């Protein structure tokens, strides 16, 4: 494939050249003073992104490693966990709980439907022995933002821990770990933070530590007690180049201003939604108020093959968008607008999407500037 392709999937994202330049610096000894200082500084800076005073650890491994760490450190066989599922990644948490032989109580919604917070309240009242509640803040498979703040208020008054996946929203949407009462918050490098894949982050509250200390965890590499008790919060060799990259990516966010960085995501999301609606397409989420800040899911119009559409975008226009996952394959498309994505990439993507749809027989009137290009 031509290396000039435009990557518009909901992560990984196109990484800025200055992040790659930073990553090409000479490898430092991982136990040396210089690297430890760099590493500890970045863990501290990540607290601002999570909006927390809790411990934040950097893990080597993709976002799923942080999800795995969250569950493996608190769940023993037979422990009850309320897993809220309304998409692929909520289901992943459920499957991780099963892998550690936890007892899953699933609160299941159709993909694309909002979570009813009353259901969560009732489930916790019905069974006060529930040890944890898992949920996804930004369900990348459907393009929906779930109500963590509201669920946090409910879980706070119980013995249960609130475990949240913010892999596709941290840095691109407002996440307030402390205010919302999130006990374990898992995230990843390759989305709104602006790094390549391979690094993940986890924040751990005092309430979570109390459970972790009492849990006889079977995990070794991701055992959070080892991270906490290590002088540098890093028991094993850390990804040195990615740490250089993280510093650069956080510098970019700081130069932009963190709140402005989030606002930029909000604007790109709104622009994408309005643009696709203007060409007659329908958003996948039932209620636009639940739409994600970082990924837009769009229904494929009747009579169009969604997989063909994704293929045409890639082969004819060099733009990679995502299709639907699992049972939504061919039925929806997803456009990511994370990290450094600006209106420039949105304009090109939607213009090419409209031309690709027209190629596939969709009845749409191209704007005058696109007609001669489409006829080429
Ligand atoms: C919401 C969410 N959770 C979990 C994951 C899995 O993360 P990773 O592929 O980095 O392990 C993803 C990846 O797209 C995601 O979007």
Image (cartoon, rainbow, N blue to C red):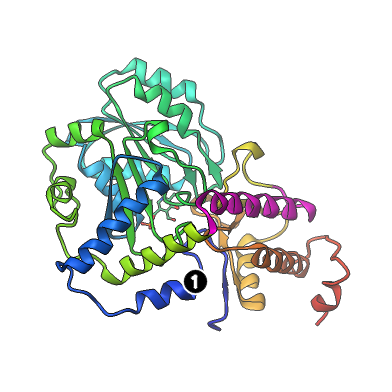
Is residue 249 found left or right of 38 in the rendered image? Answer: right
Q: Is residue 91 left or right of residue 6?
A: left
State the residue position of label 1.
Answer: 16
- Mark 1 Cβ and ligand 1 under 8 Å apart: no
> As rendered, which of 68 and 246 lies closer to the eye?
246
Residue at the (35%, 55%) spot, across then down: 63
Could you say where residue 111 lies in the image, as x and y percent from the top left? 53, 41
Q: From the viewer's perspective, tell me whether residue 62 is left or right of residue 1.
A: left
**Percent coordinates x, y for residue 343 in the rendering:** 67, 62
Q: Residues within 10 Å of mark 1 (few under 14, many from 20)?
A: some
Residue 365 point in image, percent of width and height: 86, 62
Q: What are the residue bounds of the magenta stretch?
A: 256-282
Which quadrant would residue 135 be assigned to in this image?
top left
> Quadrant location of ligand 1?
bottom left
In this view, 97 is above or below 126: below
Residue found 14% across the figure and 45% down from its top: 225
Report the predominant secondary structure element of the magenta stretch: helix
SS class, disc 1: loop
Q: Quadrant of the C terminus?
A: bottom right
Q: Judge by depth and name the residue closer to the eye, 41 or 223.
A: 41
Q: Position of residue 284 (x, y in %)?
A: 63, 46
Towards the viewer: 168 or 94: 168
Magenta highlight on residue 270: yes
Please, is residue 20 above or below residue 263 in the view?
below
Q: Residue at x 29, y 18 (%)?
A: 128
């Amino acid at each position: 494939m031509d290396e000039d392709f435009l990557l518009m999937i909901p992560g990984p994202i196109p990484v800025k050249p200055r992040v790659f330049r930073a990553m090409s610096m000479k490898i430092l000894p991982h136990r040396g003073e210089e690297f430890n200082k760099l590493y500890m500084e970045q863990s501290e800076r990540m607290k601002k992104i999570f909006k927390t005073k809790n411990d934040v650890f950097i893990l080597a491994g993709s976002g799923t490693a942080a999800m795995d760490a969250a569950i493996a450190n608190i769940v023993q066989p037979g422990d009850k966990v309320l897993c809220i599922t309304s998409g692929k990644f909520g289901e992943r948490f459920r499957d991780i709980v099963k892998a550690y032989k936890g007892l899953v109580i699933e609160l299941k919604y159709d993909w694309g439907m909002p979570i009813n917070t009353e259901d969560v309240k009732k489930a916790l009242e019905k069974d006060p022995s529930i040890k944890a509640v898992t949920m996804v803040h930004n369900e990348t498979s459907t393009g929906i933002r779930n109500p963590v703040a509201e669920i946090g208020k409910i879980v706070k008054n119980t013995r249960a821990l609130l475990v949240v996946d913010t892999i596709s929203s941290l840095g691109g949407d407002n996440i307030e770990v402390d205010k919302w009462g999130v006990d374990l918050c898992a995230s990843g490098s390759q989305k709104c933070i602006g790094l390549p894949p391979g690094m993940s982050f986890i924040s751990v509250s005092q309430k979570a530590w109390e459970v972790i200390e009492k849990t006889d965890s079977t995990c070794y590499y991701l055992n959070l007690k080892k991270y906490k008790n290590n002088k540098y919060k890093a028991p094993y060799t850390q990804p040195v180049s990615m740490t250089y990259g993280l510093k650069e990516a956080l510098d970019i966010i700081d130069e932009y201003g963190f709140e402005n960085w989030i606002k930029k995501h909000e604007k790109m999301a709104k622009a994408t939604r309005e643009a696709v609606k203007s060409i007659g397409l329908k958003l996948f989420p039932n209620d636009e108020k639940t739409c994600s800040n970082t990924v837009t899911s769009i229904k494929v119009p009747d009579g169009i093959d969604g997989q063909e559409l994704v293929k045409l975008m890639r082969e004819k226009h060099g733009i990679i968008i995502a299709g639907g996952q699992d049972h939504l394959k061919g039925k929806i498309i997803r456009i990511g607008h994370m990290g450094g994505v600006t209106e420039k990439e949105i304009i090109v993507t939607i213009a090419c999407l409209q031309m690709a749809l027209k190629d596939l027989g969709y009845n749409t009137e191209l704007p005058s500037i696109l007609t001669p290009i489409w006829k080429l």
